[in-house]
């Protein structure tokens, strides 16, 4: 594999880890403070927001 492909795979892996950490953090916060919202709903919403942001960034990069 070329070094560029390995770099892309590493970046994708790190993005996946960040998304999972953010979703887990949101679920933990809402679990500790139940008045905030249903934990699963908040975690899914936060993960969807991160994925949407990453999709927008990826689209901008591809268009360039």
Image: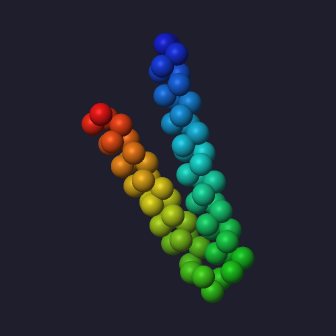
Depicted 62 relative to depicted 30: above or below: above
- Residue at image point 50% right, 59% down: 47
59 and 44: which is toward the camera: 59
63 and 32: which is toward the camera: 63
- Residue at image point 59% right, 73% down: 39
**Position in image of residue 20 (x %, y %):** 59, 52
The residue at the far left in this view is: 63
**Position in image of residue 32 (x %, y %):** 72, 76
Depicted 7 relative to depicted 57: above or below: above
Quadrant of the snapshot with the C terminus: top left
Question: Coloured how?
Answer: rainbow
- Residue at image point 51% right, 64% down: 46
**Residue 37 as seen in the image, left or right of residue 51:** right
Depicted 62 relative to depicted 43: above or below: above
**Position in image of residue 27 (x %, y %):** 62, 67
Quarter of the figure with residue 63: top left
The residue at the far bottom in this view is: 35
Depicted 34 relative to depicted 49: above or below: below
**Position in image of residue 55 (x %, y %):** 38, 48
Quarter of the figure with residue 29: bottom right
The residue at the far right in this view is: 32
């Amino acid at each position: 594999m070329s070094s560029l492909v390995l770099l892309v795979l590493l970046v994708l892996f790190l993005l996946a880890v960040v998304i999972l950490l953010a979703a887990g953090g949101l679920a933990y916060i809402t679990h500790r403070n139940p008045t905030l919202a249903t934990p699963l709903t908040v975690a899914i919403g936060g993960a969807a927001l991160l994925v949407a942001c990453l999709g927008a960034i990826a689209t901008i990069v591809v268009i360039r």
